[in-house]
Structures are given as structure tokens and as C-alpha cells.
Amino acid sequence: MSELTKLLTEPPVWIWPLLALLIFVGIKSTKHRRIPTFLVYILPLIGFTNIPILMNLQEQPMVWTVFSGAIVIGTVIGFVLQKIWIITKEKHHITLAGEWVTMISVMVLFWANYVSGTIQSQSPDFYANVGFIVAFVTIIAVFSGWFFGCALRVAITKKNQ
């Protein structure tokens, strides 16, 4: 079996529908939209899906130190940029301008996890390498933090009268 075939057939079956859903969400975010506010508040849960992966990495004190710093950076970036895209906020809805950062964020998180799983199964020594761990944790934390920052900005934005 070729390496490309393995990359497409060895992951769990649910990976590909998840990718389709994330692409759908990302494409929707590129358009001007009015959405229920709770959707913005549940997006940070994406960050929590990475905790089991992070808990299984080597060098735990370093993992959580890097994660803590990087998630703060991502949160600040999301908080600052979300202000640009908020058009109106109502009681239960928010209108947002289209942007590509959400699409980029969900794709980076998906593919970082996919590549990490592939590396773990095919090159365990590289997976345990400190350089890989720092890069992976930084990517996961910054992009997860992005969603926390966006939700925080929406939470403090006053409703339009």
C-alpha cells in the first residue's frame, strides 16, 4: 500500500466528515453573517479537544508552560481582531463581517492534529522530540486561543440599541 493511500485510509472514518464540517464552517465565516451568539461561545471548545493529546506528550511541564504562554498570545490576537468584524450585537444574535481567519484556524487545528497523529504512529522518536513538541503545542495553543479571544470580545461587546 502506498504512503498516500495509508494516509487516507488509516485514520478513523469520522475524520473525513469532520473535515467536511470544518470546511463548511470556515466557508460560512468568510461571508457577512448573522448568527446565534452561543455559536461564538462554543467555538473555544475546539481548544479543549486537544487536551488529551497534550496530556500524552513527553515533557509535561514544558508542554503546559508553552501551552499557557501561546494560548494567551492567541487569545489576545483573537480579542483584538474580533472587534474589527463585529457589526452589530443583539440579545441573542451577532452580525459579523466575513473573514478568513476562522477558516485558517479550523484548518490549522485539524491538520496539526492529523499530522501529529501520523507522526506519532510512523515516527515515535520524532514525536517525542522537544522541537516537535514545542512547535505542535504552540500551533495548537495559539489557534485555540484565537477562539477564546473572539468569544471574550463578543461577551464584552455592548448590544446595539
Image: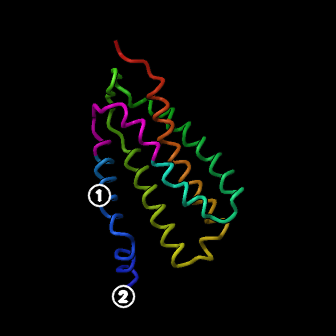
Residue 120 colored in magenta in the image? no
Q: Name the residue under label 1.
A: 20
**Which percent across, then down, holds residue 115?**
47, 67
Task: Indicate the quadrant containing the C terminus: top left, top right, bottom left or bottom right.
Answer: top left
What percent of the width, then of the height, locates residue 28?
28, 43
Type of colouring: rainbow
The disc label shown at residue 1, or none: 2
Q: What element carries label 1?
A: helix
The relative height of residue 111 versus residue 148 in the rendered view (above or below) is below
Q: Give the range drawn in magenta.
A: 28-45
Whether 120 is drawn above or below 28: the answer is below
Q: Distance between the residues labelled 1 and 2?
A: 25 Å
Tell me the SS state at disc 2.
loop
Q: In this view, does 31 lie above or below 11?
A: above
Instruction: Name the residue nearer the viewer: 57 or 24.
Output: 57
Does the magenta segment cover residue 38?
yes
Residue under the image location 50 percent in, 48 percent down: 47
Q: Which amino acid does label 1 sit on?
A: Ala
Nearer the observer, 32 or 1: 1
Q: Residue at x 58, y 58 (%)?
A: 54
Q: In this view, does 82 lie above or below 74?
A: above
Disc 1 or 2, which lies upstream in sequence? 2
- Residue type, numbered disc 2: Met
Mark 1 is surrounded, within 10 Å at the Cα level, by few (under 14), some (14 to 19) or many (20 or more) other residues, namely few
Point out residue 50 in the picture as x, y percentages from the top left corner.
51, 55
Residue 40 in which image quadrant: top left
Taking the spot 31% from the left edge, 42% from the top edge, the residue there is 30
Q: Which residue in the rendered view is the most extreme toward the right? A: 61
